[in-house]
Amino acid sequence: MHTVVVGTSGVSASDVLAVARGAARIELSEEAVAALAAAREIVDALAAKPDPVYGVSTGFGALATRHISPELRAQLQRNIVRSHAAGMGPRVEREVVRALMFLRLKTVCSGHTGVRPEVAQTMADVLNAGITPVVHEYGSLGCSGDLAPLSHCALTLMGEGEAEGPDGVVRPAGELLAEHGIQPVELREKEGLALLNGTDGMLGMLVMALADLDTLYKSADITAALSLEALLGTDKVLAPELHAIRPHPGQGAAAANMLAVLEGSQLTGHHQDDAPRVQDAYSVRCAPQVAGAGRDTMAHARLVAERELASAVDNPVVLPDGRVESNGNFHGAPVAYVLDFLAIAAADLGSIAERRTDRLLDKNRSHGLPPFLADDAGVDSGLMIAQYTQAALVSEMKRLAVPASADSIPSSAMQEDHVSMGWSAARKLRTAVDNLTRIIAVELYAATRAIQLREGLSPAPASRAVIEAARAAGVQGPGPDRFLAPDLAAADAFVRGGHLVEAVEKVTGPLR
């Protein structure tokens, strides 16, 4: 079993994916345990002094002016967790909660939070046991951290609230901890606050979205190439020398991928012999430019994620010189912006894919293909309504592209008067990624059918590999009308599982 060791200097995106989506176990490094103990000594020393220190011996947020006496401080830390565990709505996905908890543990282990080593170990033990706190959709404004989601996780560490066991059944958290021999934590000064103050939920969702989009952008290059081939388009626009004179890295990568898929095709450019076109439509000709811009957006988002993965996000923080200082590092703006930016890029990628699908189905623009790729047009409707479904998904993608981070709403009696809405940006990006997968699946379904309807000319070897793999996976080919939803579901699973990319790379080698 894969093991992820958490130290003081952050974690990698692959670590997050291994814990969130895989069965990776977590261990704390000796360095992390030593840093935790050293920071805790600083907090204990400050707690023993009469001077108020935010998070240690004061209230929180707008209540930070009240000095809390020593006998009430444990109750204060328990209370902040209980009161902040105020989420509502549907449960968020297990992988999101695991990423959330793991990334909070990452910051705790930095040695800047003042949390005791035993609390960090309990966090690791809960994750290793496959216990997943119940976290709800609504409750985070993306400032002062993902407060409500993290509070529900901290509540589980205390043995309170509800959690899902490794068997998928939701039960009282205390029962699950007891079954796995995990002792609930008794929070001390600063610990409750330290477990809640972080951008961990939005960051975890960013890391997973980037992983999913990496596959989807390759998938979109493939379906764009298949559509170009089915439309008898020209691959000359993909020549490396054309993209070298506008040297955006993503554009060059997308064009190279499409060219690799089309290698050896007898369909590309065939129109120039009997039905001349000066140029292909933008949705075909500009596919590398649009997909490339999205790739470059992903590169920027990945840089932001890497910086955040190396960060210690808490307030206040314990510094090596013994100071405990308040700060604003919990503000989610850096992460929120790129989450929104990715949703915009994904919406545009979905939009251009839908335009290609529509072109394949329109007999006036498809250069000889039957209307709606129907077997007997008029008797059969072909893929007419599959395109409706795709268009509905695109329309929702456009709504999801409206930035959440452009909004703010004041809270905590105007102490927290500007918030990032990063959690909301992350949640809508997850929906956008989900929809984009379906949109690409519909283009795949249409393009593979259209290629098979081109008789007398052979598609590229990579295209043939896609068609064979898709048909083997239950994505049916041309023929009379049938119940279409199962075919589309099979196409969705084929794209979602990465099988489209796998089929092509067996022929072309790794795509970029």
Image (tube, rainbow, N blue to C red):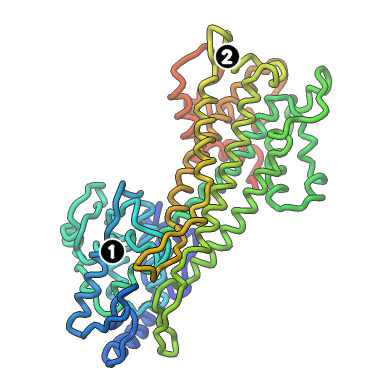
**380 up-or-down from 313: above or below:** above
Which quarter of the figure has residue 183?
Answer: bottom left
Residue type at mark 1 is His
Residue type at mark 2 is Ala
Using a 10 Å C-alpha cutoff, classify the residue at mark 2 as few (fewer than 14 neighbours), some (14 to 19) or many (20 or more): many
Residue 294 visible in the displayed image: yes
Q: Residue at x 73, y 52 (%)?
A: 248
In-front residue for pair 422/486? 422
In-front residue for pair 490/45? 45
From the top left corner, tell me how far across and down residue 264 is, in percent.
74, 31
From the top left corner, tell me how far across and down residue 474 is, in percent.
47, 25
Left or right: residue 380 compared with residue 106: right
Which numbered disc, 1 or 2, marks the residue that appears first in the sequence?
A: 1
In the image, farthest residue toward the front = 413
Which quarter of the figure has residue 366?
Answer: top right
Q: Residue at x 47, y 24 (%)?
A: 487
* Residue 84: assigned label: 1
**361 up-or-down from 223: above or below:** above
CA gap between label 1 and label 2 equals 56 Å
From the top left corner, tell me how far across and down residue 78 is, in percent.
22, 71
Marks 1/2 in contact by CB < 8 Å: the verdict is no
Q: Residue at x 57, y 11 (%)?
A: 375
From the top left corner, tell me how far across and down residue 329 is, in percent.
47, 72
Query: Mark 2 sits on what residue?
Result: 374
Using a 10 Å C-alpha cutoff, classify the residue at mark 1 as few (fewer than 14 neighbours), some (14 to 19) or many (20 or more): some
Helix, strand or loop status at disc 1: helix
Callout in the foreground (1, 2): 1
* Residue 190: assigned label: none
